[in-house]
Image (spheres, rainbow, N blue to C red):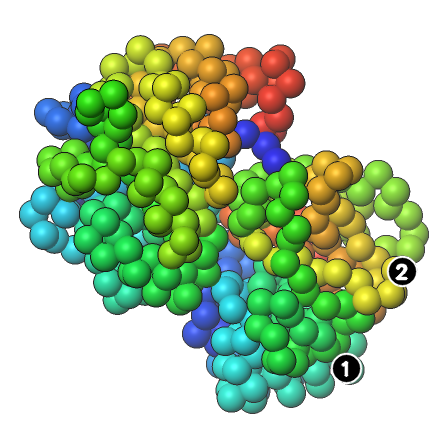
């Protein structure tokens, strides 16, 4: 299986935004333009995240999602504000291939099995916003606004028992820093992760990506480093190829 | 060249329809089996439970229509779960009979040495493509997107043409061909330009 490079599009409808430690979101470009550009340049997947839907108790912006991803023929994951089977159906029907859950899953984990039963386990992505606390990491919700009592490794174990297809592990502490992924976090979660694990939060250099792979990630998800053109998709894949880490070319 | 896409209320039919249209084919969406007679090729996609898929195909009258289309020699292309429902049965839904048009069953991917669901891009590389493959699958070599927990297992070795992808220790069946049926375990509609190229070759043949 190849190592995947996934582009992350944080959206505060209708704008593409980028924050630091999941805060202070600023407009960072045009979502549709960037989606198309990354697609043309060989990104493996795209992940759309509505960063205010949970916070404002809003539904996903269906028409915006449809507009951004029309004509894009790689996997698209949509998250942010998905709470019910109806939300899932709506999002899938307008172009999502996978749906991403965080807050709603923590509130009611059985939602994961309901959705898995409906659209297939492989299409259910669990997002975990992990923040350092007392020598370990806790799971946050609502785009890092609210904390829970869940230790991330325990939450992974619990969520997997309900049925998830893959896990996006976001380091809240490293997000937007471009100082590297939280490798300790990946090392902590990876052994108990039976499904593909996607590292997110902190990518800044080519070596960061290789380090995430060594720590046990099956893929990386990146935003600012791509949006601000610090790294290109082709140089990333070339670099990984040199380390015998297979990517889709 | 008319392509019928089976819509049975499961999975992303819209996306498959748009994908096939974008390749330049005329697409008709079938919801009850009646549109298959006017089509030259039939595409069956799908996700999730084998049992739910078969229940709907039977209820909609599409199951018998697909079998008839097979008998008439039309090209039938199964994508992902669509490739699986053409087999006899699946471990995913014990006791449910599939369309049983290909001599194979669907089994769960063994999880030793591979993460299940098998999710991501894999190289599909038919090194030993020869004239035994009827279709233009020689154009297939490339990376395609996979997202599945089950795969097709031939009942009798050599009973159908099968291609495997992945490591030697843990391979998944990525493509099969039997008579006028082609099964693709990956998603060509999610495999970028390569997926488009392949699907064009498969449908135009």
Q: Residue furthest left?
A: A56
* Apparent side of residue B22 relative to residue A81 in the rendered image (left or right): right
* Apparent side of residue B51 relative to residue A159 in the rendered image (left or right): right
Q: Residues within 10 Å of mark 2 (few under 14, many from 20)?
A: few
Point out residue B202 in the picture as x, y percentages from the top left corner: 71, 57
Q: Nearer the viewer, mark 1 or mark 2?
A: 2
Q: Which mark is residue A25?
A: none
Q: Which residue lies under the disc numbered 1?
A: B72
Q: Does B199 appear above or below B71?
A: above
Q: Which residue lies under the disc numbered 2?
A: B158
Residue A88 seen in the figure: no
Q: Does B182 appear above or below A48?
A: below
CA separation in Å, label 1 and label 2: 24 Å
At a point 56% along the width and 48% down the height, the residue shown is B116
Provide the secondary structure element on which disc 1 rests: loop
Point out residue A56 in the picture as x, y percentages from the top left corner: 7, 47
Q: Which is nearer the eye, B170 or A194?
A: A194
Q: Does B127 appear above or below B46?
A: above
At a point 76% along the width and 67% down the height, the residue shown is B104
Provide the secondary structure element on which disc 2 rests: loop
Q: Residues within 10 Å of mark 1 (few under 14, many from 20)?
A: few
């Amino acid at each position: 299986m190849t190592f995947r490079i996934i582009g992350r599009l944080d959206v505060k409808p209708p704008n593409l935004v980028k924050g630091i430690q999941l805060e202070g979101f600023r407009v960072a470009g045009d979502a549709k333009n960037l989606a198309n550009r990354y697609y043309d340049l060989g990104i493996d997947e795209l992940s759309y995240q509505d960063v205010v839907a949970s916070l404002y108790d809003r539904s996903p912006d269906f028409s915006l999602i449809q507009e951004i991803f029309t004509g894009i023929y790689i996997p698209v994951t949509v998250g942010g504000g998905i709470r019910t089977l109806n939300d899932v159906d709506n999002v899938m029907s307008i172009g999502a291939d996978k749906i991403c859950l965080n807050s709603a899953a923590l509130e009611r984990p059985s939602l994961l099995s309901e959705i898995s039963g409906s659209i297939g386990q492989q299409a259910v992505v669990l997002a975990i916003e992990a923040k350092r606390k007392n020598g370990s990491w806790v799971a946050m919700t609502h785009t890092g606004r609210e904390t829970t009592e869940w230790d991330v490794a325990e939450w992974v174990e619990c969520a997997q028992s309900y049925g998830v297809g893959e896990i996006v592990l976001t380091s809240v502490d490293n997000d937007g820093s471009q100082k590297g992924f939280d490798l300790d976090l990946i090392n902590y979660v990876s052994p108990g992760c039976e499904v593909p694990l996607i590292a997110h939060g902190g990518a800044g250099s080519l070596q960061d990506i290789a380090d995430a792979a060594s720590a046990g990630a099956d893929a990386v998800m990146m935003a600012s480093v791509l949006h601000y053109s610090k790294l290109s998709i082709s140089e990333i894949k070339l670099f990984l190829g040199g380390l015998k880490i297979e990517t889709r070319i | 060249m008319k392509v019928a896409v089976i819509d049975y209320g499961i999975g992303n039919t819209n996306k498959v329809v748009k994908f096939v249209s974008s390749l330049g084919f005329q697409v008709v969406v079938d919801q009850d089996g009646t549109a298959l007679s006017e089509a030259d090729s039939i595409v069956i996609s799908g996700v999730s439970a084998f049992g739910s898929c078969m229940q709907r195909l039977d209820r909609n009258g599409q199951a018998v229509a697909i079998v008839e289309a097979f008998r008439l020699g039309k090209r039938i292309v199964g994508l992902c779960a669509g490739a699986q429902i053409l087999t006899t049965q699946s471990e995913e839904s014990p006791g449910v009979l599939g369309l049983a048009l290909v001599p194979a069953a669907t089994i769960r991917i063994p999880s030793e040495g591979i993460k299940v669901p098998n999710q991501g891009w894999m190289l599909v590389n038919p090194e030993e493509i020869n004239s035994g493959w009827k279709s233009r699958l020689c154009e297939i070599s490339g990376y395609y997107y996979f997202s599945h927990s089950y795969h097709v297992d031939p009942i009798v070795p050599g009973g159908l043409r099968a291609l495997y992808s992945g490591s030697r220790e843990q391979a998944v069946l990525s493509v099969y061909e039997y008579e006028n049926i082609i099964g693709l375990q990956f998603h060509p509609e999610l495999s970028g330009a390569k997926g488009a190229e392949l699907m064009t070759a498969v449908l135009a043949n």
